[in-house]
Image (cartoon, rainbow, N blue to C red):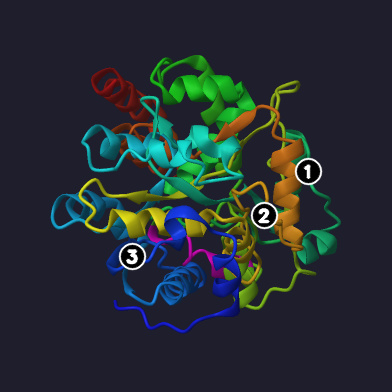
Amino acid sequence: MRSIFKTSAAALAAATMLSGAAQADLEGTLTIISDMSNPGPRAVMEGLAADFDALHPNLTVDLTIVDREAWKTQIRNALSAEPPDVVNWYAANRMAPYVNSGLFMDISDWWDAGDYAGLESVRGAMTMNDAQWGVPYTYYQWGVYYREDIFNELGLSEPTTWEEELANCQVIVDSGRACYTIGTRFLWTAGGWFDYLNMRTNGFDFHMELARGEVPWTDDRVRQTFANWRQLIDMGAFIEDHQNYSWQEALPFMVNGQATAYLMGNFAVDQLRNAGLTDDQLDFYQFPAITEGLDMGEDAPTDTFHVASGAQNVEAARAFLQFVTSADVQSRINGPDGLGQLPVNANASVADDEFIQQGFEMLSQNATGGIAQFFDRDWPAEMASIGMEGLQEFMVFPDNLDDILDRLESARQRIY
């Protein structure tokens, strides 16, 4: 897709904030491949490309947007054959295959040169082998988004303990509804449930030890996580046939009141609002405690931009990364009219939006256990894929747990 550009006031304002490479007389073509394919993020990405192009009259930005799920299997080929200059991807362990195979450019010198003022606290998420391999541009909380109006109808309040969660769920099921909608066709949503149940059952440190392959999947502590999960499955907490739905296709169950809640990232809010739910009908709570006394760990995935090691227009790529992480641009793209998420630049403004503010408060004050990236980002890619297949299978056939854990343990021993 070729971008069509018009200069915006926001882009020109952002230009005054940038220096160095971003103010160079850039020429040629900057090629970007992005997986921001959902409607809201797509508009943000197209706006970024348009604004950056408008800042540099002698530069053409060539933007291609691909399906987010498809990109997970296409990225390696894209980086290997006629690579673009800039691509979207993810922080932490998900960078490893492309760092280790030499497909991402080491941009440590740009970090050291001060290109990313305000990003010091997130530098670690982009660090591997003592070097930096990209920049973050947004992060977001996960948690339970729920129908506040239905809770009020049923006389329920936000649960803070597992006992309260189960009691609420029983009332919801008795009313003829499912407690949770979920779509596990693409598997990763089941990973979110495991993340929270395991962090709440065994703690953040144990969760990360499991992710690093230091704990057997057949460990009794892992089995307790699944035992807690099965309590919800056995009581009919989840919508039926969820393995046939994508996460978006599962949204109508919450919109039409057949299910009351969704364990999901904050990116779902835009789609719930677009589907007709008002903020008076929606609310959010932190996933409740299970084991008393454990500090609360949270999933807060970080999305990133990277420069391909085979980039042709490195100067323009450097300038684009500086542009997209600048405080003004960060404030704008992460607001409720953009991604509806949290800015990574400490000098940016957190939007005056109910859910963004709740997420910021939770992550800054109530995530004392630690911040995880997400199951398919914290685990090595092959282990994550096999693991999520097992998690989905457990949700559909919980009696298969012993076979599932044996398979995951065999995979752990082989992969690590």
Give the x, y percent position of residue 203.
Answer: 61, 23
Within-10-Å neighbours for mark 1: few <14, some 14–19, many 20+: some
User: Label 1 is placed on what type of residue?
Assistant: Pro
**In front of the other: 16 or 246:** 16
Name the residue that disc number 1 marks: 159
**In front of the other: 92 or 233:** 92
Q: Would you say residue 313 sits in the magenta stretch?
A: no
Q: Residue at x 27, y 21 (%)?
A: 410
User: Label 3 is placed on what type of residue?
Assistant: Asp
Marks 1 and 2, the one that precedes in the sequence: 1
Q: Residue at x 30, y 65 (%)?
A: 30
Q: Are marks 1 and 2 in contact (CB under 8 Å)?
A: no
Figure check: 144 above or below 201: below
The label nearer to you, 3 versus 1, is: 3
Name the residue that disc number 2 marks: 348
User: Label 2 is placed on what type of residue?
Assistant: Ala
Q: Would you say residue 247 sits in the magenta stretch?
A: yes
Q: Which residues are magenta?
A: 244-254
In the image, farthest residue toward the left: 81
The mark found on residue 260 in the picture is none
The label nearer to you, 3 versus 2, is: 2
Name the residue that disc number 3 marks: 67
Marks 3 and 2, the one that precedes in the sequence: 3
